[in-house]
Image (cartoon, rainbow, N blue to C red):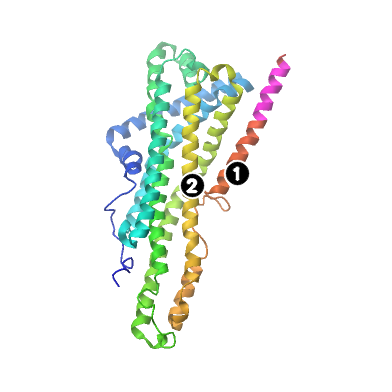
Amino acid sequence: MAAYQTFFEPNAALSEDPYWPLRLIFLDMFQHKPIKYLLNIMLVLTTILIPLETLLLLQAFDGVYFIKYFTTYIGSIFTCITIYSIPQIHKSISYGMNHLGIWTMNSAGPVVEKSIRREIFYENVFTIITLVLSVLTGMTYMVPNNNDKDFFLGQVVIEKFFPKFEKLLSFSHKMSSLVVSIVLIAPFHMLIYYCGHARMQFQMFLRCLRNLNYGYDELDLLKSNYNEEYQKEITRRLKFSIDRHVRIYSVHDKVLKDLRNYIFVFAIFGALMGLGLVVYGVSSQSSLQEKYLHVVGLGTTYILTFIHTIWVGQACENVTSQMFEILRQSDWYYWNDKNKKIYLLHLLKSEKPYKLQYSQNVSVNYELGVSMLKSIFSMITVLIRLKHDYYLNRN
């Protein structure tokens, strides 16, 4: 029975973290006091900046002006939201990791372990590439440029409302770009970190379900009902599987309940950021050449983070959708009536796959990705038409 080793209680703590790059950068780093202090200062300053930016947009009340600064305006709001949300998300993720119960990667045998390690390796590489690109993009924002006021609405605010401190505030505003480049992608990768661990636990749990009859392959069907040792072992395995299933799902539900509003807000502002980048690239031909590295770097980082988040949500859904089919194919006909009733309960609980759902009908999966892309392109069409009409009326 040694190969059937996944039927034991998982560890309370994580002994080996295969997602260590995500944990180190997007969770542990934000727990240091200097970083917390810096983020609090940025939150206060950004909160002051946003109303002033809004005032400038309302005063101008111009379509081209709005398109010109739309990306950085949304970026300011998004930065404020992400800084505020990081401690809340960290708290929820920590709860999930502490209560999920962790099986080490070798718990389900070498085949499953190899598959999990390969997936995690590619995810870690993808994360590092995204992080490096995001930091490099932040560094390009730090380089002084005479045309910064044509892209950064914050620079216009500083020039208009704080002329006496313009040099100091402009320098601070540009230096903050390096921190912002990490902050903007942090909440997404914190969610990716937790969902990756949850998916890993689900993958090993599937091994349990496939091996409900392990060790009794040669059992005589006619005598199985009278084999007390076998029926007791099946009862134990079924109860363990149900307990494990309920535990994972209940922890997921708690974490998702805490994060649901944040996921919804990030989905909205993520779509707006994508919209702003594309519209700026399409409509700002004169300044685009000077801001080429800014726009391409930010756009590529956005796309990579978007793809990774959507993929993780879909991967969780795909893994959990296998549970019902695996249970359905179990050799349940060997079991007595008591075990069949337990099995039926397990089957009913596994019928609905787990989704990263933040509303009744919307989940983080490929379907959401496609719908967001459609919405972005629809809005792009409207804004481009708006600019075309504006120039037509001026001429």
The disc at residue 371 is: 1
Q: Quarter of the image holding residue 61?
A: top right
- At label 1, the amino acid type is Ser
How packed is label 1: few (under 14 Cα within 10 Å), some, or many (20 or more)?
few
Q: Is residue 343 above or below residue 170?
A: below
* Residue position for label 2: 311
The kind of secondary structure element at disc 2 is: helix
Q: Residue at x 38, y 17 (%)?
A: 171
Q: Is residue 83 visible?
A: no
Left or right for 105, reference 296: left
The kind of secondary structure element at disc 1 is: helix
Residue 230 in percent (x, y) is at 36, 81
Residue 221 in percent (x, y) is at 44, 84
Q: Residue at x 63, y 35 (%)?
A: 377
Q: How many marks?
A: 2
Mark 2 or mark 1: which comes first in sequence? 2
- At label 2, the amino acid type is Trp
Residue 156 in percent (x, y) is at 49, 17
Residue 302 in percent (x, y) is at 49, 35
Q: Quarter of the image holding residue 169?
A: top left
